[in-house]
Image (cartoon, helix red, strand yellow):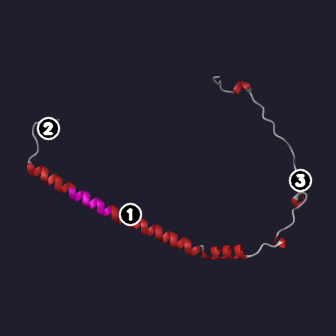
Amino acid sequence: MNINFDPARRPGLLTQGLTAIVGLVLLAVAFMFSLVFFALVAVAGLVFWMYFWWKTRALRKQLRERMDEPVRAQDFEPPVSGPAAGGEIIEGEAVRVVDAGRQLDQAP
């Protein structure tokens, strides 16, 4: 395989100038595309936020109305004594058994 690379041979002034111009043009095009991309992301985020805000307006109104109402004692149910719906209450305690044979050795 012959690459024909000679490190002593440098590109000419015209080649360097064209390379710089092409690099600057590509950099400007990439910058323009990034601006368009970020603008689209910002608009999509704004549309999503406005949709969310519009869909939750009724909930916010209900919350404001509920916060303005005074608290009354009859609004609360008395506590239930005993198991609910005839269920069973199971009481117990847990004991942790340590198996010394399965522990990792710890350095003191």
- Distance in Å between CA atoms under marks 3 and 1: 60 Å
Q: Position of residue 68 (x, y in %)?
A: 71, 75
- What main secondary structure does the magenta stretch of the protein show? helix
- Distance in Å between CA atoms under marks 1 and 2: 42 Å
Picture layout, residue 45 above or below residue 16: below
Give the residue pinned by disc 2.
5
Does dot 3 land on a helix, a strand or a loop?
A: loop
For residue 6, side relative to residue 46 (left or right): left
Q: Amino acid at mark 3?
A: Glu
- Distance in Å between CA atoms under marks 3 and 2: 87 Å
**Camera-nearest label, 3 or 1:** 1
Does dot 2 land on a helix, a strand or a loop?
A: loop
Q: Earlier in the sequence, mark 3 or mark 1?
A: 1
Q: Quadrant of residue 29?
A: bottom left
Q: Which mark is residue 38?
A: 1
Q: Which mark is residue 73?
A: none
Give the residue pinned by disc 3.
88
Q: Are marks 3 and 2 in contact (CB under 8 Å)?
A: no
Could you classify mark 1 by the number of other residues whose Cα lies within 10 Å: few (under 14), some (14-19), or many (20 or more)? few
Q: Position of residue 101 (x, y in %)?
A: 71, 24
Q: Amino acid at mark 1?
A: Phe
Does dot 1 land on a helix, a strand or a loop?
A: helix
Q: Residue at x 11, y 42 (%)?
A: 10
Q: Position of residue 7 (x, y in %)?
A: 13, 36
Q: Amino acid at mark 2?
A: Phe
Residues in magenta, as a range: 24-33
**Camera-nearest label, 1 or 2:** 1
Q: Are marks 3 and 1 in contact (CB under 8 Å)?
A: no
